[in-house]
Amino acid sequence: MITYERDKCIKCGTCADVCPRLTIEICDDGYPAQVRPHDCMECGACAVNCPGGAVHVAAGVGCFSALVNETLFGKRAGCGCG
């Protein structure tokens, strides 16, 4: 899950620019919004590249979790990695 601290956001748009699945868009007010959360693979690119430290991604979820489930249970990874 991705969260962000609005008071730390500098409205640079980097989070949207680096998102490989295009799940973040910049709203009319300049702040980001995760418009397609189910497409997010929670790779952390948005958090790592956020110059204000406003974006946070929960650890142990997303793409890695999908790949583990694919390996253990034979389910296809739905994160675009497999």
Image (tube, rainbow, N blue to C red):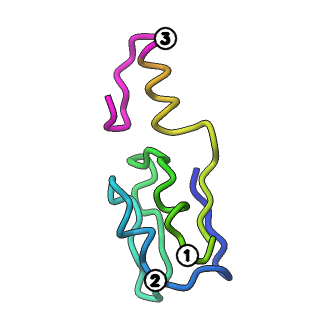
Q: Are marks 1 and 3 in contact (CB under 8 Å)?
A: no
Overall secondary structure of the magenta stretch? Answer: loop
**Quadrant in the picture for the C terminus:** top left
Mark 2: few, some, or many residues within 10 Å (few <14, many ≥20)? some
Q: Secondary structure at mark 3?
A: helix
Query: Is 2 colored magenta in this rendering?
Result: no
The earlier-in-sequence mark between 1 and 2 is 2
Give how far apart the Cα atoms at labels 1 and 2 are: 8 Å
Which mark, residue 72? 3
Q: Position of residue 6 (x, y in %)?
A: 64, 78
Q: Which residues are magenta?
A: 71-82
The earlier-in-sequence mark between 1 and 3 is 1
Q: Secondary structure at mark 1?
A: loop
Q: Which amino acid type is marked by label 1?
A: Pro
Q: Which residue is mark 2?
A: 12
Front: mark 1 or 2 = 1
Q: Which amino acid type is marked by label 2?
A: Cys
Q: Are marks 1 and 2 in contact (CB under 8 Å)?
A: yes
Give how far apart the Cα atoms at labels 3 and 2 are: 40 Å
Q: Are marks 3 and 2 in contact (CB under 8 Å)?
A: no
Q: Residue at x 33, y 34 (%)?
A: 81
Q: Residue at x 47, y 89 (%)?
A: 29
